[in-house]
Amino acid sequence: MSTKREWFAAFRYVAPADFEDWLEAQAREGWLLEHVGQWSSILMTFQKGEPATYRYVIDAQVSPRPDYLATYEDAGWQHLGRMASAYVWRRSYDDQRPEAFTDAETVRARSQRFVGAVAVAGSVLAVGGLAMLLASFFADLSAGDANQMLAAGILFEAMAVALVFVARRIRRQRDR
Amino acid sequence: MSETMFLILFSLRSERHGYGVMQHVEELTEGRIVLGAGTIYTSLGKLEADCLVAVASRDGRRTNYLITPQGTEVLRQEARRIAELSRYAKEIL
């Protein structure tokens, strides 16, 4: 069975609806996502199969209640796994494209959970980067160590800034 | 209160789990409203946080919820508001 690997897909399609649409397009071409793991946001593997019509849904849940999985599964959704706090679901359909979020309030709440997760990650990176930058200038380090610390600090701050743009993009599409 | 929240509260006058609420709402509205799994899960969490519903029992992986006295009062208030709007609506039908 042939496979296809996609690198950093979750970072290329940061808005949940964009990511879902992209997965659905892959399935229509016969590239099926069968399992999601912690590292799938970095490397995602698709299996070649028959073209299929699947509705994918991604849902951020940091600490879901005990009935989270059952609520989706009872409604016909298949759990493919999770990437960090992002649960990935799919459901086949013929005519009517199924939705997991069926009112404006919960669609926005879903987007807001992703914005929150991105904000937490961005804050951690920003604080960590700032600590590294300060250490590179003021800590008692050798020149080599100070330069490494400076480079890591700049990298962390750059990633934090990138996450600000990610959060803004998700917010712009919060009603999808 | 949104229509979704009203219908979920209405449905939880009897003990039901998430999917049970989805089925009941679909039946009640004759298929006009089909709640999604994410919507029902999110809404139940919010209603529970607001103390309008509470966990009644657990059945394996499922959790059964039931409206609280506070939730019943809120549902009654909303029903009165909707009944008043309904009276106005009849004038133009």
Image (tube, coloured by chain):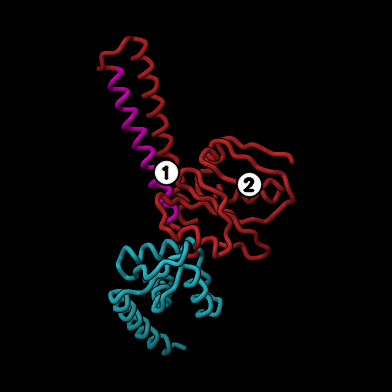
Q: Left or right: B41 with respect to A18?
A: left
- Identify the disc placed on residue B19: none
Can you tell which chain is drawn red?
A: A
- Asked if residue A124 is positioned above or below residue A61 in the image, the reply reads above
- Compared with B32, A94 (above or below) is above
Q: Specify the amino acid type for callout 1.
A: Ala
Q: Nearer the viewer, residue B58 or A1?
A: B58
Chain coloured cyan in this rendering: B
Determine if the magenta segment contains residue A135: yes
Extreme residue in the top direction: A143
Of marks 1 and 2, which one's residue comes earlier in the chain? 2
Magenta stretch, main secondary structure, is: helix
Q: Quadrant of residue A46?
A: top right
Query: In which quarter of the view is residue A89 placed?
Result: bottom right
Point out residue B28 in the picture as x, y percentages from the top left corner: 50, 80
Q: Which residue is mark 1?
A: A167
* Count of number-bearing discs: 2
Closer to us: B8 or B82? B8
- Marks 1, 2 in one chain: yes
The residue at the point 49 percent across, 63 percent down is A71
Q: Residues within 10 Å of mark 1 (few under 14, many from 20)?
A: many
Q: Which residue is mark 2?
A: A33
Which residue is rendered at x = 55% and y = 80% of the image? B30
Q: Nearer the viewer, residue B86 or A87?
A: A87
Q: Is residue A10 visible?
A: yes
* Residue at image coords 68%, 63%: A94
Q: Over which residues does the magenta segment extend?
A: A110-136
Q: Position of residue A171 (x, y in %)?
A: 43, 49
